[in-house]
Image: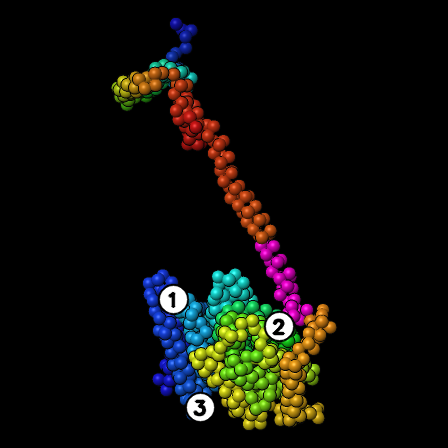
Amino acid sequence: MNSFSQITIHHYLILSALMFNLGLIGIIIRKNILVVLMCIEVLLNAVNLSFVALARYYKLMDGHLVAIFVMAIAAVEAAIGLGIVISIFRNRQTVKTDELRFMHG
Amino acid sequence: MNSMNNLILLIPLLPLIGFLINGTIALQKARNKLNTGTTTIALTACIMPLIAFVLSILVFLNLLNNPNGSEITTGNLLDWIVVENLSVTFGFVVDHLSVIMLLIVTGVGTLIHFYSIGYMKEDEGFAKYMAYLNLFLFFMLVLILGDSLLLLFVGWEGVGLCSYLLIGFWFTDTAKAQAGKKAFIVNRIGDFAFMIGMFTIVAVFTQIIGQVDDGVLNFPKNFLSFEFLRNNAQGLAPMATVITLCLFIGATGKSAQIPLYVWLPDAMAGPTPVSALIHAATMVTAGIYMIARMHFLFVMAPVTMNIIATIGLLTAFFAALIGITQYDIKKVLAYSTVSQLGFMFLALGVGAFSSAIFHVMTHAFFKACLFLGAGSVIHGLHHEQDVRFMGGLLKKMPITAITFLICTLAISGIPPLSGFFSKDEILYMTYANAPHRMYFWLGLLTAGITSFYMMRLFALTFLGATRNPHPDHIHESPAVMTTPLIILAVLAAVSGLVGLPGNSWINGWLHQLGQHIPHHIENSVLQEYHLMGISIGWAALCSLTAFIIFTKKLTFAENCKHQFGGLYRLVYNKFRIDELYNGVIVQPIKSISDVLLFRFVDKTIIDGLILGGLAGSSRFVGRCLSVLQTGLLGHYLIYFIAGLMLILFLVIQ
C-alpha cells in the first residue's frame, strides 16, 4: 500500500479525459446507432466524473449539483434518442449510420 | 413696352402648341381612335406660323420706329442653370439681326406650310408631317431668339432633330431612313465641335475670374449670354482662334460646308417642302446666323476668318461643279444650296457680315421658290424627279415655269433681280478685303458656273421637247401650291431693293455687325461699277451658253460627256467623297466596333474572362467544398469538434 502513490485529482481528471475521448471516438466510428447512444452515455459519465472530482477537490457543492442535474438530463435524452432510433428504423429499416446519408451532396 | 416683351415669347410658343396639337392627333390617328379631317389638321398647323409671322411684323415695325432701343427682350424668364462656375438664364431677345431672320423664317415658313397642304395632303402621315414642321419652326425660332449661346445651341440641336425626322419621313424606305441618319450624325459631329467651343469660352472666363476676383460669389457668371459675351469679348482674345474654329466647324456641320456637307444632297430623300424649308431657307442658314451673332469674336481671330473664307469659296466652287452634272432636279438644287452657302461663308470670312445676311435673305426667297417649283414639277409629273424625263413643261405648267425662270435668273445674278445685288456685294467685298485677288476670280468663276447649271436645269426641265413617257397626265399644281410660288418669286425679284449698292438699307440696319464698306479699292484699276459690269456680263454669258446648249444643241453636251469621260465620271460621282469618307472613317469605325470592341473586349474579355471567370471560380470553390458534405454523421461531428477546438484555442490564446 505504501508503494502506491496517492490518488490525486490529476488521476481523476485524466481518467475523465480518456473516457471522454473514448466516447467521442466511439460516436464518430461506430456504425450502429444504439452503440452511438451508448457512447453518448459514456461521454456524459466522463463529464460527470470530472465535475464530482473537482467538487470534492475544491470542497464546493456546485459540482455535485451539476452532476445530479446532468444525470437527469441524460436519462431524458436517452429516452428521446431511443424514440428517434425506433422511428428511423420504422422508416428506413436500418440502424447503420453509413446507410443513412440522405443529406449527401 | 411690356406687352411687346411678352409678345416675343408668343412667337416660338405658337408653333410649339401647333406641334402638340397635331402630334396628339397623329398619335391618336395611328391608334385609330380619331378621324380628324385633313382640313382641321392643316388649318391648325398653318395658322400658327401665320400668326407668328404677323407678330414678327409687329416686332419689326416696333424696332423700326424705335430710335432708342435696338432690341426687345423678355429679360430673364427663368434661371435655367445655376452652378458654381456658370449661370445660364432663359430669355428671348430680338435685335436688328434677329428680326430679319425672324421675318424670313416665319414668312417663308408660313408659305411652305400652306404649300405642304397641297403637296402632302394625300399622305397618310399628314398630321405627323405638319406636327414635325411646326416643331421645326419652334426650334428654329428658339435658335434665332435665344439670348445666350447655350439657348441658341438648344435650337441648333432641335432643328437637327427635326431635320432627321423630316428627311426620314418615309422611313419604310431604308435608303430614306439612312439619309436621315446620315444627316443627323454628320450634324452631330459639328455639334460636338460647337460644344467644345462653348466649353472653352466658359473655361477661359472661369480662369480669368479666378485670377482677378479670387472667386467672388456675386460676380455674374452668365458667361454664355450674348450680352455678356459682347461686353467682355476682349477677355477671350488669347483663345479666340480656338473658340472661333470650333464654332465654325459646328457651322460647317449645320450649314453644309466642306468637310461636313455630305448630308445635304442625301437629304433630298425627304419631301420637297422640307427641302425647301429646312435645307434652303432656314436651317442651313443657322451657321451663318451664329457667326454673324458672334461677329465681335470672329473679328478677333483673323486666322479663322481666312479659313472661313477659303472653305466657303472652295465649297462654292466644288459644289457648283458637281451641280453641272446631276440629273435629279432636287440634287442640282441641293448642290446649288451648298454652293450658295459657300458664298455666304466667303462673305463672312472677308468681314462682310451684313452682306452675308442679305444673301441669306435673297437666297431664302429664290431657293425656296426653286425647291417649291421643283416640288410642283414632281407633283405634276407624278413623282418623276429625273430631268431626262422632263421637258416641254412651259406650256403645261406655266406658273411653275415662270416663277422658276425668275428665280433662276435671280440666282444667276441678273439685275434687277435680288440675287444680283446680294451676290455682287459679296463679290465686291471679296475683291476688296480677301487675302488674295484669286478669291474674287474663283468666286466670279463659280458665279458663272452657277448661272450655267441653273439655266441648264431650267432648259432641261421646262423647255424643248417633252421626254416624259406619260405626257397626258401632266397638270399644273393647285392654287394652294402655286400661290406661294408667286409670292416667293415676287419677293425674289424685288427684295434687292433693300440692298442697293451705295444706298443699302440693310447694311444700315445691320450696322452693328461692323461691316466696313470700302468706297475706294486700293491698288486696283477696277472699281465697283467695273466689277458689277464684269459679273453681269459673265453671268449672262454663262446663262446664254447653257440656254443654247440645252435647248438646241443637246448633242454638244453628250459629246462633251464622252470627250472628258474620266473627268465627267469623277464629277458626276461627286468626286467620290462619300466613298472616301466611307472607306477612311465609316468602315474603320465599324470594324473597330465589331472586331475589337464587340468580339474581343465585350464577348471575350468581359463576358468570358470576367463574368465567366467569376462564375467559374465560384463554381469551382463550391465543387471543392461540396466534397465535405458526405451525409455521414461521423464526419459532421469531426468538423464540429475541429471547429470547437479552433475556438477554444483562439479563446485561450
Q: Which mark is residue B26?
A: 1
Mark 1 and mark 3 lie on one chain; the one further toward the N terminus is: 1
Residue lying furthest right: B563
Give amino acid for label 1.
Answer: Ala
Q: Chain of mark 2?
A: B
Q: Work out how far the residue at label 2 is from the one at label 1, CA to CA, in angstroms.
A: 36 Å
At label 3, which amino acid type do we have?
Leu
State which tag comes first along the sequence, 2 or 3.
3
Q: Where in the figure is residue B364, as x and y percent of width and height?
A: 52, 81
Please report, as a chain letter, where disc 3 is located. Answer: B
Name the quarter where the N terminus of chain B is drawn: bottom left
Q: Residues within 10 Å of mark 3 (few under 14, many from 20)?
A: few
Quick one: B280 or B549, which is closer to the camera?
B549
Callout 3: helix, strand or loop? helix
Label 1 and label 3: CA atoms lie apart by: 40 Å
User: Would you name the residue on which mark 3 appears?
Assistant: B64
The residues bearing labels 2 and 3 have C-alpha atoms spaced at a distance of: 44 Å
Most foreground residue, B184 or B571: B571
The colour scheme of the drawn protein is: rainbow
Would you say residue B582 sits in the magenta stretch? yes
Of labels 2 and 3, the one closer to you: 2
Q: Is any atom of residue B554 visible in this view?
A: yes
For badge 2, the amino acid type reads Gln
Q: Position of residue B598 (x, y in %)?
A: 56, 51
Question: Which residue sits furthest front?
Answer: B472
Co-location on one chain, circles 2 and 1? yes
Tell me: B411 left or right of B6. right
Residue occupying the point 58% across, 92% down? B501
Determine whether the residue tagged by mark 2 lies in a helix, strand or loop. Answer: loop
Return the residue at label 2: B326
Residue at (70%, 77%) from the top-left corner? Answer: B556
Q: Earlier in the sequence, mark 2 or mark 1?
A: 1
